[in-house]
Image: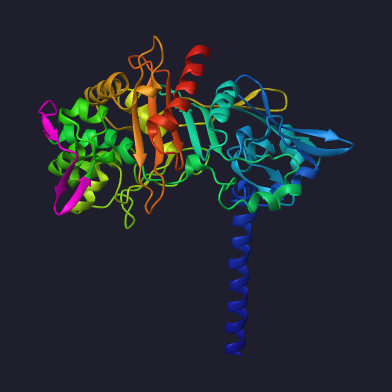
């Protein structure tokens, strides 16, 4: 009898634990489960919920649900211009991009109004919330058309607020009638249209020198001293070449950044030491989760650890000019550029401006918040000065604008193997009172000045004209 009693108590206890688990997940954590974009209930709910619209900052429709021949249809008036950032919502394919991560608002689940709560409780038809983005369709269009035909990404940010004004990845895809051409999309293995290149990791090349600059300043190196660039140097048995083995001659820090001198930054990066370099990288957000509405992979210094405790001399020398094992997302580089423009403070990036309920009452409105202080104002000013020199008298001159002072840096990153270099260009303008910061990446595009700078110039020109 005692054994039977123990078995009965064990079974009763198991049912009790299971009941607690059901209560926890069905009641306490029900909203968390429902808001997860992987939860197909969100998609299935759309038979009775009209998904809210997505609009740009000027009220232009980006995505909207319409009833066509008695059937709800998700309409994307801009075609592929916002893809893959915008993503899609499909009963068959699920949800991705902003359509997925913002589903809790769009379906009227998050911070639901009293009416929405009652409608949800009784499974009644209801209207979701509208989401207004910080994106500017005019700026997005310029970036999209300038990048079209290439593989790459372009990001524009307001450095003072962290608002993402344009976010383009190419190639993209048309989300209209997605199911019918889904196989064609996933079979494009080279173009990878579903991949958001703004959030993909690539070697940064010479644009990394703006990060290394902070390490030089903090280690006490006199950046006014002259260094003789002969076209290459040897550090601990490792040959550090200049692009095309070009000898820059005698350069100080300003001219080394303007001319994109690898040997200068490798030499003084090693002299500054790995602790100083790694601290500077971490201060710019390497190895840290970016607080953003979409998932952005962590940028890294090494493969073993995103930001390790130490670096070998050879790896430090290569990392100082953006090679070695350094990988960064174009989005991260846009934030770094915006931080330099904003006197060293990187604002928390955001793409949602506000959320409106079905009666157009404001449910949520984003407020600018600092994320990281990467530089002191003095350090930011020094880098800005060198980036201005890069435009007026260096490799970044193709991004210059008439009657506007631009601060910029080029990058041509070696992807490994016998492949064409990736082209980078980071910039902000006007240099003294920045209103726009951009990062442009062209995969296997060649030089930053040749492939990426003209795109950045068009984006900045449009942004400054509009504001």
Q: How is the image coloured?
A: rainbow
Please report the bounds of the magenta region as a residue range. Answer: 220-240
Residue 219 at what x, y percent from top left?
13, 36
Specify whether 8 is left or right of 428. right
| 432 over 281 or under it: above or below | above
Q: Quadrant of residue 328?
A: top left
| 114 over 276 or under it: above or below | above
Specify whether 466 is left or right of 382. right
Q: Residue at x 15, y 37 (%)?
A: 230
Residue 432 at what x, y percent from top left?
32, 14
Does the magenta run of residues contain 328? Answer: no
Q: Quadrant of residue 425?
A: top left
Q: Residue at x 61, y 51 (%)?
A: 188
Q: Residue at x 35, y 31 (%)?
A: 410
Most extreme residue toward the right is 69
Does the magenta run of residues contain 234? Answer: yes
Q: Quadrant of residue 404?
A: top left
**Residue 313 in view here:** no
Specify whether 276 is left or right of 292. left
């Amino acid at each position: 009898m005692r054994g039977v009693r123990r078995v009965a108590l064990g079974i009763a206890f198991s049912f009790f634990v299971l009941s607690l688990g059901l209560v926890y997940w069905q009641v306490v954590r029900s909203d968390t489960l429902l808001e997860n974009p992987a939860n197909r209930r969100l998609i299935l709910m759309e038979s009775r919920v009209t998904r809210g619209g997505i609009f740009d900052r000027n009220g232009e429709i980006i995505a909207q649900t319409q009833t066509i021949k008695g059937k709800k249809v998700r309409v994307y008036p801009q075609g592929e211009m916002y893809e893959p950032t915008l993503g899609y919502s499909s009963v068959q394919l699920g949800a991705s991009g902003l359509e997925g991560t913002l589903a809790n608002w769009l379906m009227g689940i998050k911070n639901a109004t009293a009416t929405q709560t009652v409608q949800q409780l009784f499974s009644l038809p209801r209207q979701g919330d509208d989401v207004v983005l910080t994106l500017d369709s005019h700026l997005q269009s310029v970036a999209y058309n300038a990048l079209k035909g290439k593989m790459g990404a372009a990001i524009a940010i307001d450095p003072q607020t962290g608002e993402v004004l344009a976010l383009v990845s190419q190639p993209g895809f048309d989300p209209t009638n997605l199911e019918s051409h889904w196989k064609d999309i996933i079979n494009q293995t080279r173009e990878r249209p579903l991949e958001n290149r703004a959030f993909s990791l690539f070697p940064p090349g010479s644009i990394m020198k703006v990060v290394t600059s902070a390490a030089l300043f903090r280690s006490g190196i006199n950046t006014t001293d002259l260094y003789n660039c002969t076209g290459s140097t040897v550090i601990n048995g490792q040959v550090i070449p200049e692009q095309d083995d070009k000898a820059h001659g005698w350069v100080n820090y300003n001219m080394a950044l303007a001319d994109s001198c690898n040997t200068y930054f490798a030499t003084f990066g090693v002299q500054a030491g790995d602790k100083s370099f790694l601290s500077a990288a971490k201060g710019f957000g390497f190895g840290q989760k970016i607080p953003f509405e979409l998932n952005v992979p962590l940028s890294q210094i090494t493969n073993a650890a995103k930001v390790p405790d130490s670096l070998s001399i050879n790896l430090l020398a290569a990392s100082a000019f953006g090679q070695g094992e350094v990988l960064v997302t174009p989005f991260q580089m846009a934030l770094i550029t915006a931080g330099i423009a904003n006197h060293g403070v990187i604002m928390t990036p955001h793409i949602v401006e506000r959320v409106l309920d079905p009666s157009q009452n404001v449910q949520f409105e984003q407020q600018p918040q600092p994320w990281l202080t990467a530089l002191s104002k003095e350090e930011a000013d020094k880098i800005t000065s060198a980036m201005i020199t890069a435009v007026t008298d260096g490799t970044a001159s193709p991004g210059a604008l008439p009657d506007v002072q631009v601060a910029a840096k080029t990058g041509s990153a070696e992807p490994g193997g016998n492949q064409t270099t990736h082209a980078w260009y980071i910039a902000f303008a006007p240099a003294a009172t920045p209103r726009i910061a951009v990062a442009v990446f062209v995969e296997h595009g060649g030089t930053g000045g040749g492939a990426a700078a003209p795109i950045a110039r068009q984006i900045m020109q449009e942004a400054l004209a509009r504001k």
